[in-house]
Image (spheres, rainbow, N blue to C red):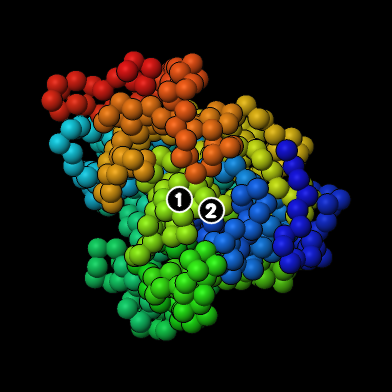
Amino acid sequence: MYKRLLLSGLVLTTLASYGTESAAPAKDKPNIIMFLVDDMGWQDTSVPFYNNQTSNLNTRFQTPNMERLARMGVKFTEAYACAISSPTRCSLMSGMNASRHRVTNWTLELNQQTDATSDVISLPSWNYNGIQPEGADSISNATPITSLPQVLKDNGYRTIHCGKAHFGARTTPGEDPAQMGFDVNIAGGANGAPGSYLGTRNFGEGSRFAVHGLEKYYGKDIFLTEALTLEAIREMDESVQMKQPFYLYMSHYAVHSPYDDDARFSGKYRGKEDKQLNAPLNESEARYAALVEGMDKSLGDILDYLNSKPEVAQNTIILFMSDNGGQGLNNVRQGVENRDQNYPARAGKGSAFMGGVREPMMVYWPGVTRPGTECAQRVIIEDFYPTILEMAGVKSYKTRQVIDGVSFADALKEHRINPDRTLIWHFPNLWGETQNKEEGYGAYSAILKGDYHLIYTWETRQLRLYNVKEDIGEQNDLAQSMPDKVKELAKELSDYLRARDAQRPTLIQTNSLIPYPDEK
């Protein structure tokens, strides 16, 4: 359902240049900005995304431009991604669920899996070389696709990639956004994090995760987030001068580690008393809050650019999203109240629990979205592919891959939601950070249907069931008390995975495939 919002302490207004509720949609093809943040938890913002209630974490962060975008458009309260970066980005680019494209963990080096090891299970040979452009069929352990930017490019868009790519392994065509349908690639490659955010350190030049393509900023006192924003604005302006509609994929490295000091903002957080902690922020927390505010400044700078050109602003759609749950920091324990980036959701990045997959999401569509509203339509990352194409007016296109995503454009245009939307996650892998199965880490598959979230842990064959409407922190396992619901959801999850021939781990002791959830 849709609700009209009044953000705490904010007047519900929009800048005149962005139009009003009654503004007619522009006849020209709209410009589209996909603003994706890395590792941002759904509570890492001053915008409340849970029951429209400001949490203690919301008071920690200062994101005035996210507040501004929320006033302009629609805030989604049921937005989800994969729990790890590369699967999310591959789903965004392909419209496929991770169980279909099989890039189920993070990618980096050619022909190298990135999984942790286990004495209990061996992992399937997933597509660790990532997604690839059409024609790259000779690359093993990869998925050739018709990419979202390629379809937009074929339909008259100037496509711009700015920031983190992380959807193809090194030395493959998929490493390079310019081979994945983007006319312009700014600083995108195989690396999933920056070697450094600091221009004075040449953004990590010489390290495994060096950011390339921003050499003109080397040695300068500039933060990576700022440099990327300057380049994005320059390319948007170039598109405007060319009188060509643009698709900007503003894909920030922030707020991923390393937590370099963004001195523009960190001073205000260092030592600040925090309501969530009832104690001062530590150094890691102060630096993280500064990374978040730097990302928010980027959003504001892009909005300001559009505002300086009203005719462009009135024809530019903005989508805001994060790629997975918030990352735990030094001295911040995931899953523990008052020291968790995702509280009241449980756990964080890499976990099957809500803290691993629930995201902050907003959309502004001039003449379509109602200012200052919220939408409870359930959305997952692969839905952006068909939605963006529908927004662009692209009605006839062919893709090599089967599209799993479902457009949420009608939820924006007609202000109705589909309450029966079911979401599926598949991660038959071991993330390298932790294998704490109690907190949802390790190989898992999961289904969210109605109010119920069923999690299947492949190693233990355990099924856990939670009512996330009543128990967002997923503390009360209902599996024993609701066996019929477990059976129903286990079958639906298993049928979905079977239909996609989803890969499964193997038990080392017996050298046999682990049964599907409904076969345990």
Direction from residue 138 to residue 331 in the image, left or right: right
Q: Residues within 10 Å of mark 1 (few under 14, many from 20)?
A: many
Q: What is the distance, in whole Å, between disc 2 and disc 1 at their CAs?
A: 7 Å
Q: Residue at x 69, y 43 (%)?
A: 375
Q: Which residue is mark 1?
A: 325
90 in relation to 421, above or below:
below
Q: Is residue 168 visible?
A: yes
Residue 477 vs residue 61, the one in the foreground? 477
Q: Secondary structure at mark 2?
A: loop
Q: Secondary structure at mark 1?
A: loop
Q: Please tell me how many numbered marks the rendered image carries.
A: 2
Direction from residue 388 to residue 313 in the image, left or right: right
Look at the image and tell me in which quarter the C terminus lies: top left
For the residues labelled 2 and 1, say whether their Cβ atoms are less than 8 Å apart. Answer: yes
Look at the image and tell me in which quarter the N terminus lies: top right
Q: Which residue is mark 2?
A: 42
Find residue 196 and report its horizontal and vertical position in percent: 34, 71
Direction from residue 471 to residue 168 in the image, left or right: left
Q: Residue at x 61, y 71 (%)?
A: 301
Task: Give the image quarter of residue 401.
Answer: top left
